[in-house]
Image: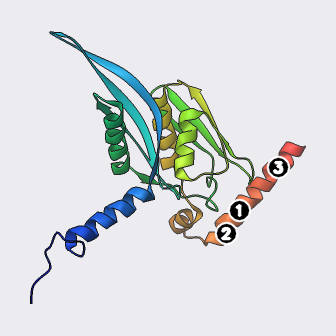
Amino acid sequence: MAREPRGGRGGRDGRRGGRREEERDEFSDRLVAINRVSKTVKGGKNFGFAALVVVGDQKGRVGFGKGKAREVPEAIRKAAQEAKRNMIRVPLRDGRTLHHDAQGRHGAGRVVLRTAPPGTGVIAGGPMRAVFEMLGVQDVVAKSVGTSNPYNMVRATVDALKNQSNPRAIAAKRGLKVSEIINRRAAVQQDATSADAA
């Protein structure tokens, strides 16, 4: 009986290629910044491009990367590859906002992230907005305090997101039930609302 060649459509390589296609479709990317960079050499200057890209699945995973190349598309491709390697998972509340307020810092970049009620939308500056949209956050209020450098803003935002924790993790750490944590959070939010009203 003749065996089907390995490289054929039904072979191992065909399946692997299909998986790669699915993986590629799973993530979406956003170009945040592109710079023209130059290197001075003996014969003059060599020009290239540096790209900053944010990649996410819009379901709680996000990553950023930077890439350099002589051409713009190649720089973007390299940045997207690095972003996929450096992805983090962030727990989202109801799949739309953060579980709690957070602050992040990187270099001169400082950001403040706050949870928001449904219908608020993404209130954030350009580089931060790209991170939230790729993450899948629908309601958040964010403020950048300090530098407007997109590299530092993105890094500070990711730093703040790394500190996010969900009620299940906190309950396990403290030896409580998840419902107790959620009830406490609701009580604290109610106290804050009544204090604002007064």
Where is residue 70, by image quadrant? top left
**What is the residue that sits farthest to the front in this orientation?**
2
- Binning the other alpha carbons within 10 Å of mark 1 as few (below 14), some (14 to 19) or many (20 upward) gives few
How far across and how far down the image is residue 65, in percent?
A: 37, 40
Of the pair 52 and 183, the residue shown nearer to us: 52
In terms of secondary structure, where does tag 1 sit?
helix
Residue at image location 59% in from the left, 28% down from the top: 145
How far across and how far down the image is residue 131, in percent?
A: 52, 43
Question: Mark on residue 180?
Answer: 2
Vertical placement of residue 159 versus 165, above or below: above
154 sits to left or right of 196: left
198 sits to left or right of 17: right
**What is the residue that sits farthest to the bottom in this orientation?**
1
Nearer-N-terminus badge (3/2): 2
Which image quadrant: the C terminus?
Answer: top right
Question: Mark on residue 95?
Answer: none
Q: Amino acid at mark 1?
A: Arg
Q: Amino acid at mark 2?
A: Glu
Residue at image location 54% in from the left, 70% down from the top: 175
Say which residue label 1 marks. Answer: 184
Mark 1 to mark 2: distance in Å? Answer: 6 Å
Vertical placement of residue 158 versus 145, above or below: below
Q: Amino acid at mark 3?
A: Thr
How far across and how far down the image is residue 4, in percent?
A: 15, 79
- Binning the other alpha carbons within 10 Å of mark 2 as few (below 14), some (14 to 19) or many (20 upward) gives few
Residue at image location 43% in from the left, 52% down from the top: 88
Nearer-N-terminus badge (3/1): 1
Mark 3 to mark 2: distance in Å? Answer: 20 Å
User: Which of the two discs, 3 and 1, sits closer to the camera?
Assistant: 3
Mark 3 to mark 1: distance in Å? Answer: 14 Å
Say which residue label 3 marks. Answer: 193
How far across and how far down the image is residue 77, in percent?
A: 34, 41
